Amino acid sequence: MKQLSNQALTLIRKMQQNELTESVIYQEIAKFAKGEGNKQALLRLSCEERAHYEIWKKYTNEEMKPQGFKVFKYKMIARLLGFTFAVKLMENGEEGAQEEYALLVNEVEESIMIREQEEEHEQALLAMLDEEILQYVGSMVLGLNDALVELTGSLAGFTFAMQNTRLIALSGLIIGISATFSMASSEFLAARSEGRSDAFKSCTYTGIAYLITVVLLILPYLLLPNESFLLALGCMLLIVILIIAGFTYYTSVAQDEPFGSRFKEMTLISVSVAVMSFVVGILAKKFLGVDL
């Protein structure tokens, strides 16, 4: 085996460590992933990474240990947000590795084979993952979007019309809970009319997404003093943006969709509705002469 440069050996050690760590991550996630097909795909990915580790070990002659914190981190992400999101997030973090492979090509011919497997075979295995929560992303988006648009508008309108955080929270809570049941039942009936057997699951995901959004948006009005209604409005709008950013990022990673355009669209709609509703609240208070 020819002598390698110090730069090449440094890169190989780094890749060897990553391959072993990711092999262990796939293996650990496979232990609790639901569905036999998902388990097998994850175990095959683990074997692929382990095989790459063994190839790199021939050049370093070093035995390595997996990075414990990285293994723990992705196990926790997989449990909290789903294994599909976790493994795709991990793979997305390897985009810079392509440049490293390019630097190795002249010194290590096997790096070409490993890179091709990373790009083709492993991507094909990732595409085989089938997680229940991702089957109902459409239902969650429906509940999330409707809650953001409807409740953001309502709370913004109530803010100036009532100018009391407790009254605003009470009104928003009544509207939010009623709308949660309404949206969930509508999703159930729509799914049943389409002849789907998963109508109950679909409406459950819709209702949960709606209810969580309602609670988060009302929270500033419950926590802040009565006279801090404008601060509560600002906090609510910030929460709206954070919810949109978080959910859009989740779906962009888990479903390989663009982040920027969807985030801008949802944010623009929600904030625009809030501004218009705030103006409606001002006009209603002025022309109706209601003073709460």
Image (cartoon, rainbow, N blue to C red):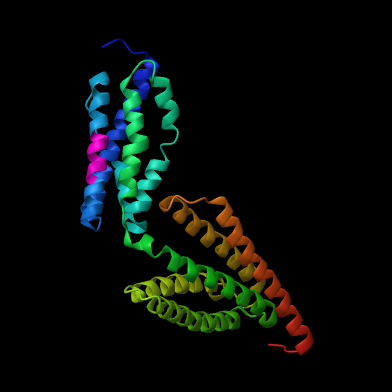
Q: Quadrant of the N terminus?
A: top left
Number of labels in the image equals 0
Q: Which residue extends farthest right? A: 287
Q: Is residue 128 above or below residue 197?
A: above
Q: Is residue 18 left or right of residue 216?
A: left
Q: Which residues are magenta?
A: 43-50
The stretch drawn in magenta includes residue 101: no
Relative to the observer, which residue lies in front, 229 or 92?
92
| Closest to the observer, 281 or 169 | 281
Find residue 223 and report its image quarter: bottom right
Residue 46 belongs to magenta span: yes
Query: What percent of the width, then of the height, locates residue 165?
Result: 60, 78
The residue at 35%/25% (across/down) is: 112
Q: What's the magenta bit mostly, secondary-structure-wise?
A: helix
Residue 189 percent location from the top left of the image: 42, 81
Residue 87 higher or lower than 14, as above or below: below
Residue 81 relative to residue 265: left or right: left
Quadrant of the frame with the C terminus: bottom right
| Above/below status of 195 relative to 95 | below
Residue drawn 76% across the image and 89% down it: 288
* Res. 67 in view: no
Extreme top residue here?
3
Specify whether 132 is left or right of 216. left
Q: Is residue 149 shown to the viewer in this render?
A: yes
Residue 17 spot, x, y in % from top left: 30, 31
Q: Residue at x 38, y 79 (%)?
A: 192
Residue 85 screen position, x and y as percent:
38, 52
